[in-house]
Amino acid sequence: MTNLNLDAFVADLEELRSEAERALVDAVDMQGLEAARVVFLGAKNGRLKAVQKGLGKLDREDKPVGGQQFNAVKKSVEALFLQASQRVESLSKNTKGVEPVDVTLPGNPVRFGRVHPITQTIRRVSSIMANLGFEAVDGPEVEDQWHNFEALAIPDEHPARDPLDNFYIAVANADRPLLLRSQTSTVQIRVMEQRKPPLRIVSLGRVYRPDTADATHYPMFHQVEGLLVEPGTTMAHLKSVLRSFASSFLGGDVRVRFRPSFFPFTEPSVEVDMEWNGRWIEMGGAGMVDPSVLQSVGYDPDEVCGFAFGLGVERIAARRFGVADIRDFYRNDIRFLEQFHDRGQA
Amino acid sequence: MIVSLDWLAEYVDLPEVDALTERLLLSGLNHESTKMLHEDTAVDLEVTSNRPDCLGHIGVAREVSVLFQRPLKIPVASITSGEASQSFSVAIESKDMCPFYSARLIRGVAVGPSPDWLVHRLEAVGVASVNNVVDVTNYVMLECGQPLHAFDLNRLNGEKIIVRRATEGESFVAINHKEYKLTAEMCVISDAKQPVAIAGVMGGAETEISLETTDVLIESAQFAPLPVRSAARALVLGSPSSYRFERGPDPAAVEWASCRAVELILDLAGGTCIAPAIKAGSLSSSQATIDLRIHRVEQVLGVSISGQRQREILQSLGFVEQESASDATRWLAPTWRRDCTREIDLVEEVARIEGYDCVPEDIPISAVPVQRSPRERMVRVVSESCVAAGFCEAMTRSVVGDRFEEFSSPWGDVPAMVCRPPLVQGADRLRRTLLPSLLEARASSLSSGSSHGDLYEIAHVYVRRDGESSEGAPPIEEPLLLTLVTGGDFFQGKGFAAAILDRLGIYEWSAEESPKAHAGVEYGVTYRPFESAAMTAGRSAEILFHALGEKSRRIGVIGEFSEDVMKMCGCDRNSVGIELRLDGLEFTTKYEPKLLAPSSFPSIDRDMNLVVDEAISWASIRAAIESTQCDALESVRLGEIWRDADRLGEGKKSVVVSIRLRSSKETLSAEQANSFVEAMVRSCQDHVGAALRG
């Protein structure tokens, strides 16, 4: 009996290990796995068994090393088998009686709704104003003449009070005519009547004016109006607040511009433009609260002053969302409404 | 106001057109457009209603002269020649409508075409040439802002002008040859026989200047704004003249315009002026005296403008310095600036001429903490819930047609208020419910091919209350509603309603007076059958809100829409509506949730198969179970309901109730569980006559 060379023994072991690895890794089912087990780990005629027999043929001094090598390979093959059998088992579990799916088929429908673009715009405006310390307030839409006109320095003979320019309520008491409010400044009056300065509020909500509906007009629309009353308030505060607002709303450092205008309840009154892509865009009206308005709510115009501004929500929303006809905001077509994903800005 | 630059240049040297319009834009005359003409440039300027002085070229020229510091040249108007006539008379019967009236007579004019310069100027500003006499009256109005009217003197009856209130129903044929019925709110110019003009609005066909006219009466008057406006509005006869009278022309221009027109007519059409003018009434002219404190300008603008500069600006605008102290000046306002009566008006004048660019735009704004109001938070919470449930927010009109309001509202019995004019054609009722509006929107979305028609809206409705108003508080309420429409049946609707209330922390009680006030929560809702024309009978409910110590109130309705409403709204698919009244529920946002540690012990589930009479409600079964006050009762859920007359008996139903028991202190034994369930079955026997089925 010729003695086996250690190197040849180790080479056999290594060949066995790599063949076993290939066979076990390739096994995809129980049958293949079992076949591989019999070939390599079989108790009677397995190849490992056969190699083990060669161990006795090694020279005596080579035996310890050969034994270590053999044990290492045996452990490694057993571990490979365990791995492979776990893999095959889980593989068979996953595919047992189950057809694979077309993963490109649609999932079960889950649908989220949308917040109306007008509401999104109001939220955005009021959240920016909240950061500047302005609290959102609301009030009645059916108003009396005091809050809609008189307290706002719009006297009886003023054209703004013409019956054709307002929605008067037909059934109301003739001595106290009521109307659908034509501006949300009414809420500012109500708040000033109840609270003392300092005051920072934004009034928001629906307002009504008898405009013929067209692409840029609708008899019902939304306003956001800000009011700040604090001692020492100047137009510089107004301009700075509006600049902060415009910068927040549009992003970046946005310039604002004042143009003189006329509103009964502010003086001086201005139109506010903001610079957008190199152009001046009309943003809304603003001004210092007219002293007579402060007086009408019991404030002393020499003690406190304030500013007010108003924004047309539809106009902002139309520009923001590329809506050319503001009547679309009120058609309530789901195909329209579903396009406006809230981007989490407010 | 369209301005011809060629014309404007008569009164002031003009800068280059872009510089001009830019500067005007920044000082109060908003630039609308510039139109290049053959030999002229027409600039359209927006004039705010407080500035009638800028409704004439001279007024605009004055602004230019101030802004560019160039001299203003106003032509002198005076009539030197003339012969006296005493036979013609003017009387004002309604001084409140017409404080002053002057008539100038010219005899022997030759009416004909105007010279080219006049035709071109009028055309440049969009006014068509008529004849030399009429053109002059238009020209002078566009020059100084004072409207004039020319009558054919020989067609006036009785050599007399009477300014009076129209009689109700009086008829009048205007220059446009249309007949108008007048009302007593209007002021007319009448001759001895009949009205010949609606004061300040339009002349009559009968007395208009024609090619046969030889003698002319030039009217220059002051008319009160209100009658002019109401006549122009009521008759839909707005004119450049009425536009100016509504805003109040310069009183000093009344006489100037009259002389200027006569001069030009004599020049262009010949004739002789009969002097002096025939006048009635007295000019109403009030020039305010105003004190301006120098420091006030800085107090308002936030930027300092020197006293010297303030003085320069006001003087150039025509204000006359009356008295001066070191810190204040008294000013007399010019006749054409009746909008200036107070100190703040002068501050604005100084500011707009100096330019608002001088106002700083980067001063620090103090920080003030601000919280969302409970209402705002509540609205956010419910709106997020609706969006998460797949609903899109709609916005429908607050004012609806009467057919929508025939259906009663859950929120008030008094008929809907009506507004005048209608919001849009056919819609004049202030709505008391959003349900039909949303159903209509759903129907239209579905029919236009949308993938769904699930809509919600959060809006106010307007409900009048019976009884008289107490001072300052009209008996009108504006409930804030959340309304949803979707497909499916009653239970689909109730599911959404319950989920939204759940989100607000409002849970369904099994009985109106819950014995337990739900784990320390002292409010809850119950559901009760509800009758309404808008909903299908037997398939709708009202939601009642209960709070300890408060009267129960309705906070919602749910129902399958009735066929009538479906038909009216054009909806042909099963639809269910939910309407919740949110105002009054704001308090729910006040509570911070406090952890109730989940029990670490296992639960025991038991089913009870109870046979009860058909009339027994689920809520009463729940109430019977809950009345055992078993601490370990974690939940009571409906398993199933089935009916089988053979096995259960006629008029009976089987209700399978799934009970989950769990203690927070220990693992329940089967014996404990059995005894709890036995108690519950007994309670169901006692309270709802239930029999336990095998």
Image (spheres, coloured by chain):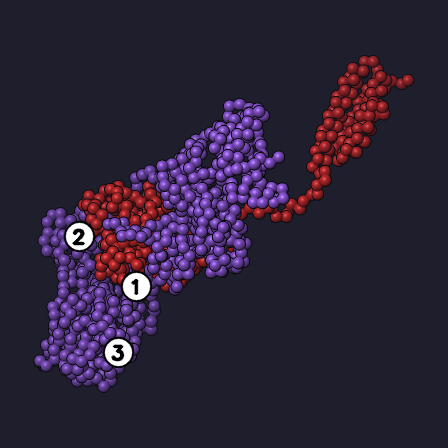
Residue in front for this viewpoint, A10 or B339: B339
Rendered view: B153 above or below A144? below
Residue in front for this viewpoint, B680 or A75: B680
Which residue is farthest top?
A60
Q: Which residue is mark 1?
A: A164
Q: What quarter of the picture does the N terminus of chain A occupy?
A: top right
- Under circle 2, the secondary element is helix
Q: Which mark is residue B348?
A: none
Q: Which residue is mark 2?
A: B343
Name the amino acid type tagged 2: Glu
- For marks 1 and 2, give the CA distance: 33 Å
Marks 3 and 2 close (CB-CB < 8 Å): no
Disc 2 chain ID = B
- Under circle 1, the secondary element is helix
Q: How dense is the environment of label 2, judged by Cα within 10 Å: few (below 14), some, or many (20 and up)?
A: some
Residue in front for this viewpoint, A38 or B652: B652
Q: Which chain is purple?
A: B
Q: Which chain is red?
A: A
Tally of marks:
3
Marks 1 and 2 close (CB-CB < 8 Å): no
